[in-house]
Image (cartoon, grey):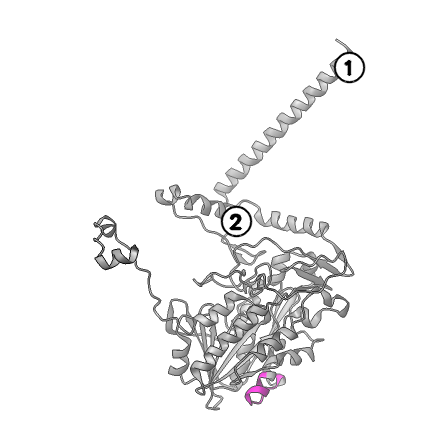
C-alpha cells in the first residue's frame, strides 16, 4: 500500500469522525433545546419586539386533522423557544454589521409582509375584525400598526412615482431611513387613496349637513420635516399629498394647517427618534393650529405641568433593532392640564359602560410609554370638563390622536375620542344622540393613504351594535331533501 493511499485513508477516517461528532453535537443540541422547551416557563410578551407572543393552541382532534393545531403550534414554538430574546438580539447585531451606513445614514430593505403587531405598534390588544386591505396595517406600526412601515402605510400599486435615488442608497417602499440616531419612515403616497379618504369624509358632511362642524387634520410624518435637504429624494413629498386631500373635501369641512405649525417648530422635540409617533409637544402645535380653524384660544404651555417618562424605545426600534437607535432612546413628555375634568374609558365588547380613568396612564413604562396618552388605543375615551363653552367635540383618530386629544380639554365641555379601528357604535347616531357640535378627523399621512384605515372610517357610518352574527346552517338542513324548483325557477335556469 503506497504512502499516498495510507494518507488518503487517514484523511477519510478523520473526516468521518468529524462528521460523526458534528451529527452527535447537533442531535445533542436539539435534544437539549427540546428538554429546555419542556421545562422552562413560557414567556407571554416580548419586550424587545413589543408584542404579545402566540399562545399554546387548545388541542382537539378536529383541529389536528384540519391542520389548524399544527400551524398554530408552530407559531407558538417559534415565539417561545429557549433563549429566543438572546437570538433576536444577536441577529440584530449581525444585521447591524452587515448593513450599509454612511454619513450617519442606514437603509433597511423592506421586510416581508406578515401579520401586523397590535397597534399601533402597538401597543394594546388585537386588531378587530375589519374588511381586508391590500395594505398591511401600522402599526400601528402599528398597528400603530408596527408593520413594515408605521401603521398606516399603503402598499397599493397605484402609488405616486418617486424620483430616482442617488446610486447606492437603496430605497424601497416600506423601509426606514436611519439618520443621526433617528428612524424616519419613508413615505410613498397614493393618489387613489387621497380621493378615497376625501370621499369618505365627504359622506359625513353630506349626512350631517349643518348639524355639526367637521374638521380634518392630516399629520405629516417625521421624514418630511426632519430629513436634511441632501436626502430629500428618498421620500415622496408629503405636502402635495395633504394639499390634494384638502382640495377634494366638501366646502363644509374645515381643514387644519398642522403642516406649517409643525414646520415652524421643526428644530424642537416634536417627533420621536425611535418611534413613528409625534411627541406631546408636536401634538400641542397641531392643537394650536386647530384653535385657529375652530375659533378657540389654546391653553398656554406654561399653564400645564410637564411630566416625563424615560427611557423610551418605540415602534421603529422594535422594527429595525438598530443599535444606533438603542443608544439614543427617547423620552415621553406629557402635560397635565389645569382645570377640572374626569376621564371615562369604554372597553371593547362593552360600549355602554363608562369606567373612570385618568386621561394620562402614568403607570406606562418602557416600550409602552406612548400609552400614557389616553391609556393607549381604546374604542372610546370620554373626558367631561368644566370648560363651560357649550361645545362638544368628537375626535375620530388612530394612535396619533392619543397625544393630541387631551389638549382639547381646555376648550370643550366634553371630548369624545373614538378610535377608527375599534369603535363599535354607529358614528352618526352617536354624534346626534350626544349633542356633538364639532367633529374632528385626525390621521397621520400614512393612515390617510391606506385603504384599511380609510375603510375603517367609512364603516363607522353603517355599523350597528350589537354586530349581526352570521347565520349558521344546522346539520338537519344539510340532510333535508332539496325542494323541487318551481316552473318559474326552471325557466330562469334555462
Q: Quadrant of residue 105?
A: bottom right
Q: Is residue 156 magenta?
A: no
Name which residue lies at 62% across and 67% down: 189
As measured in the structure, the alpha-carbon distance from the residue carrying label 1 to the one carrying label 2 is 53 Å
Tell me where residue 377 appears, x and y as whole percent. 49, 69
Above or below, 81 against 318 in this view is above
Q: Quadrant of the N terminus?
A: top right
Estimate the x, y position of residue 464 in percent, counting from the top left.
Answer: 36, 71
In the drawing, what numbered circle is on residue 79?
2
In the displayed structure image, the side of residue 345 where residue 190 appears, left or right = right
Q: Residues within 10 Å of mark 2 (few under 14, many from 20)?
A: many
The boundaries of the magenta stretch are 290-301
Counting from the top left corner in percent of width and height, residue 132 is at: 47, 60
The residue sitting at 57% across, 86% down in the picture is 293
Q: Is residue 37 visible?
A: yes
Tell me the crowding category of disc 1: few under 14, some 14 to 19, or many 20 or more residues within 10 angstroms, Cα based: few
Of helix, strand and loop, which one carries label 2?
helix
Q: Nearer the viewer, residue 313 or 257?
A: 257
**SS at circle 1:** helix
Tell me: 432 left or right of 367: left
* Residue at image coords 58%, 79%: 246
Vertical position of residue 37 compared to residue 96: above or below: above
Q: Which mark is residue 4?
A: 1
Amino acid at each position: 500500500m503506497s504512502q499516498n493511499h495510507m494518507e488518503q485513508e487517514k484523511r477519510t477516517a478523520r473526516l468521518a469522525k468529524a462528521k460523526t461528532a458534528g451529527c452527535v453535537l447537533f442531535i445533542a443540541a436539539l435534544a437539549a433545546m427540546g428538554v429546555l422547551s419542556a421545562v422552562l416557563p413560557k414567556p407571554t410578551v416580548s419586550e424587545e419586539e413589543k408584542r404579545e407572543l402566540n399562545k399554546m393552541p387548545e388541542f382537539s382532534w378536529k383541529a389536528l386533522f384540519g391542520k389548524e393545531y399544527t400551524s398554530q403550534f408552530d407559531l407558538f414554538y417559534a415565539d417561545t423557544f429557549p433563549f429566543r430574546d438572546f437570538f433576536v438580539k444577536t441577529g440584530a447585531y449581525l444585521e447591524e454589521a452587515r448593513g450599509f451606513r454612511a454619513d450617519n445614514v442606514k437603509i433597511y430593505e423592506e421586510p416581508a409582509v406578515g401579520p401586523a403587531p397590535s397597534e399601533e405598534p402597538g401597543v394594546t390588544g388585537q386588531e378587530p375584525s375589519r374588511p381586508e386591505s391590500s395594505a398591511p396595517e401600522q402599526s400601528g406600526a402599528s398597528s400603530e400598526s408596527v408593520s413594515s412601515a408605521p401603521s398606516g402605510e399603503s402598499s397599493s400599486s397605484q402609488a405616486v412615482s418617486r424620483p430616482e435615488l442617488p446610486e447606492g442608497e437603496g430605497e424601497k417602499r416600506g423601509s426606514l431611513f436611519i439618520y443621526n440616531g433617528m428612524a424616519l419612515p419613508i413615505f410613498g403616497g397614493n393618489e387613489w387613496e387621497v380621493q378615497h379618504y376625501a370621499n369618505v369624509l365627504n359622506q359625513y358632511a353630506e349626512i350631517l349637513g349643518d348639524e355639526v362642524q367637521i374638521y380634518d387634520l392630516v399629520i405629516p410624518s417625521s421624514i418630511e420635516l426632519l430629513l436634511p435637504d441632501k436626502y430629500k429624494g428618498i421620500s415622496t413629498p408629503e405636502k402635495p399629498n395633504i394639499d390634494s386631500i384638502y382640495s377634494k373635501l366638501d366646502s363644509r369641512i374645515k381643514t387644519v394647517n398642522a403642516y406649517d405649525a409643525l414646520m415652524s417648530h421643526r428644530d424642537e422635540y416634536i417627533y420621536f427618534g425611535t418611534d413613528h409617533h409625534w411627541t406631546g409637544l408636536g401634538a400641542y402645535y397641531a392643537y394650536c393650529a386647530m384653535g385657529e380653524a375652530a375659533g378657540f384660544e389654546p391653553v398656554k404651555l406654561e399653564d400645564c405641568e410637564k411630566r416625563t417618562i424615560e427611557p423610551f424605545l418605540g415602534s421603529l426600534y422594535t422594527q429595525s433593532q438598530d443599535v444606533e437607535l438603542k443608544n439614543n432612546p427617547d423620552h415621553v413628555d406629557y402635560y397635565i392640564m389645569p382645570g377640572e375634568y374626569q376621564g371615562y374609558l369604554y372597553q371593547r365588547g362593552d360600549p355602554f359602560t363608562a369606567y373612570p380613568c385618568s386621561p394620562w396612564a402614568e403607570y406606562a413604562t418602557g416600550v409602552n410609554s406612548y400609552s400614557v396618552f389616553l391609556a393607549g388605543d381604546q374604542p372610546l375615551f370620554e373626558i367631561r370638563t368644566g370648560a363651560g363653552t357649550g361645545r362638544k367635540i368628537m375626535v375620530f383618530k388612530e394612535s396619533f390622536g392619543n397625544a393630541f386629544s387631551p389638549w382639547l380639554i381646555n376648550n370643550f365641555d366634553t371630548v369624545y375620542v373614538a378610535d377608527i379601528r375599534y369603535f363599535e357604535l354607529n358614528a352618526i347616531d352617536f354624534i346626534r344622540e350626544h349633542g356633538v357640535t364639532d367633529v374632528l378627523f385626525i390621521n397621520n399621512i400614512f393612515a390617510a393613504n391606506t385603504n384599511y384605515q380609510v375603510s375603517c372610517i367609512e364603516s363607522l357610518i353603517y355599523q350597528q351594535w350589537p354586530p349581526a352574527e352570521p347565520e349558521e346552517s344546522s346539520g338537519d338542513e344539510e340532510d333535508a331533501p332539496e325542494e323541487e324548483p318551481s316552473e318559474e325557477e326552471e325557466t330562469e335556469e334555462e
